[in-house]
Amino acid sequence: MEAIGISVPKKESYDKVTGAARYTGDHQEAGMLYARLLISPYAHARIVSIDTAEAAKAQGVRAILTGTSCDVLTGEETRDRPIIAKDRVRFYGEAVAVVVADTEAQAQQAANMIRVRYEPLPVVNSPAEALRSDAPLIHERLGEYKTGPGVVPVPGTNIACLLKVRKGDLAEGMKASEVVIENSVSFAPSDHVAMETRSAVAEIKPDGHVYIESSTQAPFGVKRYVAAYFGIDPGWIVVRTPFVGGGYGGKAAIQLELIAYVASCAVGGRKVKIINTREEDMLTSPGHIGLDATVRLGSTAAGKIVAAEIIYRFDGGAYNDKSSDVARAALADCSGPYAIDHLYCDCLTVYTNHPYASAFRGYGHAELTFAIERAMDVLADKLGIDPWELRMRNAAVPGDTAPTRDVRTPSNLGDLRRACTGCARSPDGTTGRYGKWTRIRSGRKESAASGKIPR
């Protein structure tokens, strides 16, 4: 018990503050080769031809890989993504060639010498565009891809996965509602912007053991999926992760590890290192999922929510690596912390010509919370009820059911009203647990330090 209330320095703190800490990108050794990418300047285009003849003659070049070098399709939820683009590019920044050379500068110089001829195709820039009846299909072979458990694609569309929640009777709930509001929100994909960019090193020993060093948040995931994609016994794969300079979910996806592995294969198993520039990290590697959402709430005049109809359209980008799993997590808690007896939610993971998505802190919950809470504010305005009071009236309590119809208990729910009230007000009713809190409303900044909740 002596450790309680005492600040204990982390073991790695000294190394980090003195600069002694070693990250994957710091790995250098004699004989190691380096890989650089040639990326697409188009968000959607057909690859007409790739000419690597001049690049192959450049000094120090050991190998050049294109989409024809490896037929493996990858993806945790849907195996729809080639390691290097083949026949078509589906997002700006997608890798179309990999050069392996003696130095990073030589690899980059040779990559710049590769000539690619593209035929631009119509671009899908949002879930709304993707769902139009005349939208270009990003994956014509969607019905042929191998998918994981619980992934429900809709072939012939840009819907990578469609999941639904049905609880109660929506029509009856809306009929019983005295006030109905509808609100839509949208935000585009973004990037994690971890301080350390992604990097990976791969080597294949003569006895067949595969050694991978990576700035990953999921070393066991790297081991599992490299084994699955390439048919290797997992016991022959060793993954090492040194210090990781930030991840926030972005380094849970597996990408550069695969490129490093196929690059090592191309040079006889020699150790190959690849590291993203900051621009590449934002363009070529997976980012934060986007969302278009529509929330319709039905309520009594007293502020009790009776019914909700929710549509989440997640922008999964060009490939469904983790996107539909993030969407599935959001679906399970689609109505937020509120008890709603009549609830319908359609949750779509939609293909667009954006970089594909990885995990991001909250794993779908920050996104759904944004949509639900904005709808709650709109409902409060229409009812003329204090937004805080509306939330307290509808907060779930033990005995209520979740969107999945699981029964809420003190163990899986806790006491939401008590917890929220404790955060908002101190015992004397003047300030919150985290000090003075404010709310921006109708262009005015109002203080709640007096204990009054702004309307």
Image (cartoon, helix red, strand yellow):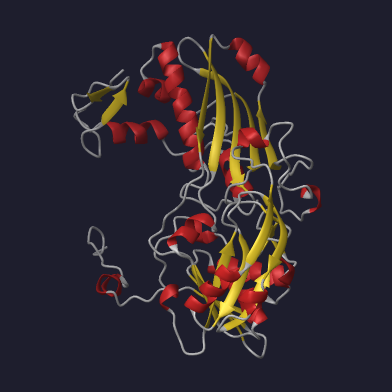
Q: Position of residue 153 (x, y in %)?
A: 74, 44
Q: In this picture, is 193 found above or below 61?
A: above
Q: In this picture, is 348 found above or below 388?
A: below
Farthest-out residue, right: 144
Using the rendered view, name the quadrant where residue 289 is placed: top right
- Nearest the camera: 22 or 427? 22
Q: In this picture, is 16 found above or below 101?
A: above
- Count up the numbered dots: 0
Residue at 51% across, 40% down: 188
Q: Position of residue 24 (x, y in %)?
A: 45, 74
Answer with left or right where residue 417 lies relative to residue 443.
right
- Nearest the camera: 338 or 74? 74
The C terminus - image quarter: top left
The N terminus - image quarter: bottom left
Q: In this picture, is 271 found above or below 252?
A: below
Residue at 23% across, 58% down: 5
Farthest-out residue, front: 54
- Nearest the camera: 150 or 350? 350
Q: Is residue 400 visible?
A: yes
Using the rendered view, name the quadrant where residue 263 is placed: bottom right
Residue at 59% across, 68% down: 222
Answer with left or right where residue 253 lies relative to residue 80.
left
Q: Position of residue 83 (x, y in %)?
A: 66, 64
Q: Is residue 405 visible?
A: no
Answer with left or right where residue 396 lies relative to residue 56.
left
